[in-house]
Amino acid sequence: MNQKLLLIVSGSIAAYKALELARLARKDGFAVTGLLTDAGARFVTPNALAAITGTRVFGDLWSLEDETHSGHIRLARDHDLIVVAPASADLIAKMALGLADDLASTVLLATTRPILLGPAMNPTMWMHPATQAHIATLRTRGVTIVGPAEGEMAEPESGPGRLVEPPALLAAIRAALASGPLAGRHALVTSGPTHEAIDPVRYIANRSSGRQGHAIAAALAALGARVTLVAGPVQIPDPPGMTVRRVESARDMLAACEAALPADIAVCAAAVADWRPVQDLGRKIKKVPGEAPPPLALTENPDILATLAKVGPQRPTLVVGFAAETHEVVPHAQAKRARKGCDWIVANDVSGDVMGGAENAVHIVTADAVEDWPRMTKDDVARRLAARIAAVFA
Ligand code: C5P
């Protein structure tokens, strides 16, 4: 049986890309039903969407014919996934507030199906605190937000606000519907560095790129897990098909992780700063000619891995940490496993070009064994680790 998508198209110039998304999704085997908001119908016609989906297009909450059979409830229930692409600022706000004054918003309120949003709007509208608050609300309700991408807009402006391209949206749709050995499991992954503020303009950071952690998040999602990725400041894009929480400091990262619990799996791949400046002064430290540099007193950050691994009702079934070492890699990793209380440590030798590079050579240190994996790409390490994790839940 084909999986069924309800594609809601709201008002944005990016609506033309919804036609391409519908075409690709059908080619990929999905049955696609189109639903246009009034504003969406000003950008693409019902006829165009009907021709591409091969079925009738919905749009009217007050259609006597449809509502005789509770059409909005059927639309809300009869699909495996509801995709809103493009999702306008207006429709996002309606969703966050629970408004239901047209067919699209009513279906979105009446559904218990998973929802995936591809926002598209002017960058100023996207960055507006109202929109950001609505997006945060929707994320906490489990809505998958894909994008927006950065780049040129229809108007002569650029910034975050472009609808993610249809092939990437389709990948996110596949991930959202993934069935696999980890279907029904929630995986929490930390990735990237943290930034620890010295003052409003300076911070302590490290060279972590987030590539390994992001790859693990993607590999777990590909095996069907629902993934929450808590990412420090990285230069790489959010992987599609998961909830991504972007944070700055170790303390923010811990708070985001605790908020994401419960989870079945926790993989702490972030290079969390061990220390932070004792106090972020809130104002820039001035350089005074002739005076000695200011002392930088540090204090220890919370240990996220050790916190998640603590025995308690919220402890994930499997907690995996990383150990970046430059010498005596395995003995140090074994000691770290015991100290942190986690189940496995993925130990890697960072004396070479691992930090920021594309490859990794790791050892998997468990309670009773050490597996030495050959040097491979970070994507392959991620896939193999995800498969190894899936075996625990088989
Ligand atoms: O102690 P060390 O930093 O070497 O431990 C590395 C492991 O611990 C990694 O899995 C890292 O994500 C995690 N960690 C953490 N919170 C910290 C420090 C490290 O979660 N404050």
Image (cartoon, helix red, strand yellow):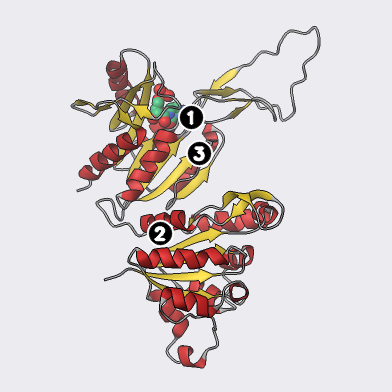
* Residue at x 41%, y 36% (from the top left corner): 213
Provide the residue designation for mark 3: 236
Q: Residues within 10 Å of mark 3 (few under 14, many from 20)?
A: few
Disc ID at residue 202: none
Q: How far apart are labels 3 and 1 at the CA level?
A: 25 Å
Nearer mark to the viewer, of 2 and 1: 2
Is the CB of the residue bearing disc 1 within 8 angstroms of ligand 1?
A: yes
Q: Nearer the viewer, residue 149 or 234?
A: 149
* Residue at x 18%, y 27% (from the top left corner): 368
Nearer mark to the viewer, of 3 and 1: 3
Provide the residue designation for mark 1: 302
* Residue at x 43%, y 47% (from the top left corner): 228
**Would residue 232 be seen by someone viewing this image from the given angle?**
yes
Q: Amino acid at mark 3?
A: Ile
Q: Is residue 360 left or right of residue 290?
A: left
Residue 231 x/y as whole percent: 49, 39
Q: How far apart are labels 3 and 2 at the CA level?
A: 20 Å
Provide the residue designation for mark 2: 173
